[in-house]
Amino acid sequence: MSDIKMTRNIGIMAHIDAGKTTCSERILFYTGKIYKIGETHDGSATMDWMKQEQDRGITITSAATNCYWKGHRINLIDTPGHGDFGYEVSRSLAACEGAILVVDASQGIEAQTLANTYLALEHDLEIVPVINKIDLPSADPQRVIEEIEDVIGLEAQDAPLISAKVGLNIEEVLEKIVTKIPAPAGN
């Protein structure tokens, strides 16, 4: 595929433990890039390739791959969520036109949610909020939608409500990527 109009360059960003690597794994699975879903807690996540990441169950370095959805090439970068790796997130987002902002449905907006949002805005990215972990008993998606709109200022009424852990509504995230994120400029 050589048509740049059919390419989407995205970063997946969130506060630590909001589920961004799990969301990345599900995207890769639903697009057919992988056939076995890796788990962060057991060190088998595709995007967490470093031994330290596998041992700790956290993302330390950004990892990039690509996959295809409905004729679109999605270049996906899974970024770290811990505040110590903000520079890594910033450098990754510089290569993107859009970002998926994963927000935990029970925790809501956290420190790195805001920090990563500001990084994405500095790079003039289209930000697509995604509400994850809606299957938790403490989940309150409507409260989190209101927080995203009131605190960050992003429209979130149509944000996909997902459970990356079980794969609920991942196709909706993929549809947002191909419809909301712009193609790279050029050609």
Image: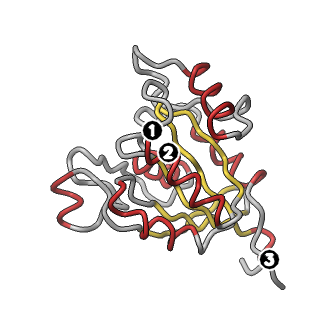
- From the image, state whether disc 3 or disc 2 is nearer to you: 2
x and y percentages locating residue 172 in the rendered image = 66, 39
Name the foreground residue: 172 vs 68: 172
Locate the C terminus by quadrant.
bottom right
Name the foreground residue: 96 vs 75: 96
Q: Residues within 10 Å of mark 1 (few under 14, many from 20)?
A: some
Q: Is residue 176 left or right of residue 185?
A: left
Identified by mark 3, the residue type is Ala
Query: Which residue is at a point 45% across and 38% down the rendered structure image?
Result: 110
Name the foreground residue: 70 vs 128: 128
Q: Is residue 88 left or right of residue 84?
A: right
Q: Secondary structure at mark 2?
A: helix
Report the residue marked by disc 2: 113
Assess whether mark 1 and mark 2 are in contact (beta carbons under 8 angstroms).
Answer: yes
Assess whether mark 1 and mark 3 are in contact (beta carbons under 8 angstroms).
Answer: no
x and y percentages locating residue 154 in the rendered image = 70, 40
Report the residue marked by disc 3: 185
- Report the colour scheme: secondary structure
Which numbered tag is attached to residue 110?
1
Q: Residues within 10 Å of mark 2 (few under 14, many from 20)?
A: many
Disc nearer the start of the sequence (3/1): 1
Name the foreground residue: 27 vs 185: 185
**Mark 3 and mark 1: Cα distance apart in space:** 32 Å
Q: Is residue 20 above or below residue 5?
A: above
Q: Secondary structure at mark 3?
A: loop
Q: Secondary structure at mark 1?
A: loop
List the single residue furthest toward the right.
187
